[in-house]
Image (tube, helix red, strand yellow):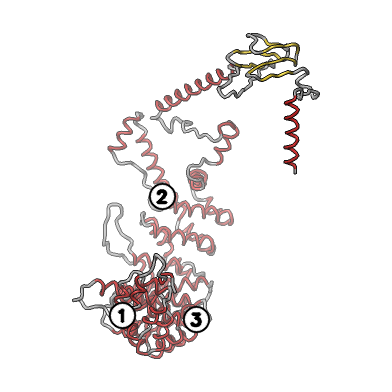
Amino acid sequence: MTFFEDPDSIFFSPIQKLLESEFTLQDLFEQDEFLQECKYLNQVLIEFLTKEETIKQILNYLLVPPSSNVTDNKICIKYPFLSSEVIGCEIFGIVEEISISESYMDTIFAFLDQEKPINSVYAGYFARIVSVQLKKRWDETWKYIEENKILDKFLNNLESSAITDLLILILIADENSFTLEDVQKTVKEQKIVDKLINLLVEEKTTQYHRNSAKILLEVATFCHNSSYNFFYEELTSEEQINKIFDLVLIAETKKSISESGFKILIGMLDIILEDSLTEHVFYEIIIKKMEDLSRVLFEEKKKSLKLDFTDEVLGADKYRIIKFFTMVARIQTKEIEKYLFESKIIQYLIDIFFQYKWNNFLHNLITNFINEIFENGTENVKEYILINCDLPSKILSNIKLYTDEKEEIEKKELKDLEGIDLIKKKYEEPPHLPQLFGYLEHLIQISNQIVLISSRSTQIQEIMENVEGWDLYVNSFLSEQNQISNQQMGQKNEESMVNNRTTNSENDNQINFWEDDESFPNLTGLKNTINDIENETVNEEISFEQDNFDNTNFVENNSNESEFGEDNFGSFTSSNDGNNKDFNFEMGEFVDGEKNNFDDFNDFGSFNQENDNNNFDFDNDPFSNDNDFGNTENDQVEGEENEKIEKNDEN
């Protein structure tokens, strides 16, 4: 009995009453607790769901879209969704019945035979059914797919992202090494790789081409790290690579085909570079195709869009070509290196970095490329970038443009020294800022990398010493920018903090924003006002503290709680019933005031006081250890009681 089956429970489910009577699948779908009872594996409910008629109804809701005449939301949306959730519960009886019944499998995979385009929602339902069957019953499901050549049907429906992801799941065998070998054999026999590449040539939709490239890349990347890497070996074979290069080099190629082809080439080259291979058939083909590739790179693109801040838009196609060449430049072979120098491709990559001032995708790409060359490249390539490409001079010239414009704007803003006028301008006129460009921070990163390699190589150091203005730039602008970058937000730099501690240790945590009047020329009046307020506050605090220091009189509050204030002369003041007595320890007497409630005062350490019916009789020196405070019977009784209490506490 489940939680909702208990009739004594306040949460007693209405579905239990329904299960005890005649009902249909639609009646169950109308119950709010239906899915919860499926997860709890209600026995009566599971028996109903595993019936042949019920399974057929569920599959029909998931695989057969309703006709356009049907407008009922329950039939179009609610019932298919709940049927999908039932499959997602992975109920053993349903999974078992589907796996052993060929009719159910025919019904499921017949979904791939319907007319295009396939409904994306129902494609998701189909993918969920098959993925559950592969997860729970891989052998039976894969056997059906292999014998009936279902993979070809998948290739005909790659416009759907759900079917594409499902095909990837099948080809990597759900990351199961025991079944991956069988899958790779089938892929080889049915020539799946060749079919996927041939699909790129056909006139298909953009999504179709992108999904084909996605399958090739993801499956090849996965199989590359596996012992069964036929898919990867087939994709990186000379025949297939030549096909892909032909796709991207044909001028009449559709844009989506060229895009997908470059994605595959970049992905494969990335895998090869990670393996640090010095020889590969891919390199040989690149050398043969280099001239055609450079033609595509230098080819002038039509200006399809003009904006106020730029003359030309880079475009996704050109960006992919540039990305491909940045990866080609990382290949350390003499043939490729020689061609890159002769064709001036590296110089073009650096020039295009400064040409598009606002394209940070391009800036990140070229910056990473330059840093990679400086870190792992050969000395010839490093010297070529610094000398032939004249990278340091280009950095200095662009930094100078920024600093000059910044100085002009600052001078213009500081002409008016009246703060009110500047405040008005702040709202009346747009802010004037220097042209930072999109690559300023990237230039700082590249400059730091140049400084780093200069410290490691004497040849690079000699080259940089001949660059006019480089040392001044490194010691001034670059140093300041690095200091700002390394400083946390809201934190002073370490040098100024150390100086503050050494000069004024008491105020080491205070930050003086008024140190430099030139930085805030229009806030002089505000500065003086704040200083006056601070001086008045300090004077009031000093006078208040002096008054409290001079007042040493003891005042007894209403609760008879006493406080004693001792001065430098060893005297204290006693206040009782409104009469004050000053007792001087040196003189051993009261200095002034009337003698209130004191019956006798004999000598130092001996006096009698009567106050509130309490008698005190000190016959001996109050500071002596020989005093006897148990003179009365009451004191003796209290002493005995205290001893008993202490003994009880010890026990």
Residue highlighted by disc 3: 229
Circle 1/circle 3 CB separation < 8 Å: no
Residue at 27% across, 37% down: 428
Q: Is residue 636 left or right of residue 45?
A: right
Residue 406, x across and y down, in percent: 39, 42
Task: Return the residue nearer the eye: 163 or 469.
Answer: 163
Q: Quadrant of residue 624?
A: top right
Q: Amino acid at mark 3?
A: Asn
C-alpha gap between disc 2 and disc 3: 49 Å
Q: Nearer the viewer, mark 1 or mark 2?
A: 1
Residue at 24% across, 71% down: 73
Q: Is residue 553 left or right of residue 296?
A: right
What numbered label is drawn on residue 293?
A: none
Residue 337, x across and y down, in percent: 48, 68
C-alpha gap between disc 1 and disc 2: 82 Å
Q: Is residue 480 left or right of residue 64?
A: right
What numbered label is drawn on residue 398?
A: 2
Residue highlighted by disc 1: 22
Answer above or below: position of 324 versus 620: below
Task: Return the residue nearer the eye: 231 or 146.
Answer: 146
Q: Residues within 10 Å of mark 2 (few under 14, many from 20)?
A: some
The kind of secondary structure element at disc 3 is loop
Task: Return the residue nearer the eye: 120 or 440.
Answer: 120
Residue 426, x across and y down, in percent: 32, 37
Residue at 42% across, 48% down: 399
Answer above or below: position of 18 versus 329: below
Q: Amino acid at mark 1?
A: Glu
Is residue 165 something one can see in this rendering?
Answer: yes
